[in-house]
Amino acid sequence: MLKKLKNVIIVVAIVFLLLFFASKNISEKNDWSVDFNGILKYPQDRGKVQVDKIFMEETDSYKQYKVVYESRDKDIFGLLFLPKDKEDVPAVIMLPGANGAKENHLFLGKKMAELGYAFLTIDQRGIGETEGAVKTMEEDFQTFFRNEEPVLHLMIYDVLKAFDVLRNEKIVDKDKIVVSGESMGARFAIVAAALDSRIKGALIFSSMGYGMHPTTTAEQKFFASINPDMYIDKISPRKLVVFHSEKDSVVPYGGAQQSFAYANEPKEFITMPEPCDHGYCDVVYDQFLEKLDWILE
């Protein structure tokens, strides 16, 4: 009886040790953090890219795919346009604004692919085909306070994984991938460009940050961690281009100029003419291509 009890104690002790070291390894592999200044941290090595490509359309100049890639706990849906018979092509990630679906940039993706660019646009969490719900700021802060990844951080990680998806494409020049976005998507684009120095630069539309604030409390750290104004200077020495309309009905023109002022050179601010309002505007398509090539130099 004593021998049997002794064996049970040994087994329990072994199980306890295994659980202890397993939990220790899990914590050591936790690659998400926010530093004292409120700056979000993710590694450049984000593991193997898990992506499915579903063929959709082919023309003389490009192929179009629906892509589904794994990012943390979600399948992220996107549209990918790849030029045909090309090598070492530059690439663009385009992030729609709040409630904007990937199909909003269908025509732009086709035009870009015809010119020899790879182009990827996605449905962000809770939008279009990508499942999930964007929490309120207070709900997301409570998640952060529990030392769990907030949804707004996960959405930034999704952009970094979109970058990985493009780097995984054989015809894409891995050193010439630019991140672009409009409104909310532009905020994520700024943060992602700051976090991964391999992103060539950022070209954004109709966005602004929240100003510079202290980070002495948990709430302030969380707010800073999603504030593009805290990151925009870190894009330098890579290039930043900001497009904004004086008539923007959503994001004040002055607010965009203030955020731009926080950025370091090299940078350019382009005022979009009428009838441009909020977001990407076809009127500035030629300037968009011109400034994209400037970033890619």
Image (cartoon, grey):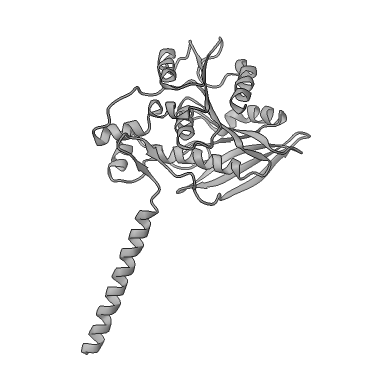
Q: Quadrant of residue 114?
A: top right
Question: In the image, what residue occupies the spot 27% across and 83% down?
Answer: 7
Residue 92: % across, % down = 60, 32
Does residue 242 appear in the picture of this structure? no
In the rendered image, the residue lying farthest to the left is 2
User: Compared to 106, does 67 lie above or below?
Assistant: below
Question: In the image, what residue occupies the spot 41% across and 29% down?
Answer: 231
In the rendered image, the residue lying farthest to the right is 60
Name the foreground residue: 120 vs 237: 237
Residue 278: % across, % down = 50, 18
- Quarter that holds the C terminus: top right
Name the foreground residue: 194 vs 162: 194
User: Compared to 181, does 174 lie above or below?
Assistant: below
Looking at the rendered structure, the number of numbered marks drawn on it comes to 0
Residue 187 relative to residue 56: left or right: left
Q: Quadrant of residue 80?
A: top right
- Quarter that holds the N terminus: bottom left
Residue 8 relative to residue 244: left or right: left
Question: In the image, what residue occupies the spot 37% across and 59% down?
Answer: 25
Residue 115 relative to residue 246: left or right: right
Does residue 68 appear in the picture of this structure? yes
Residue 103: % across, % down = 59, 32
Residue 16: % across, % down = 29, 69
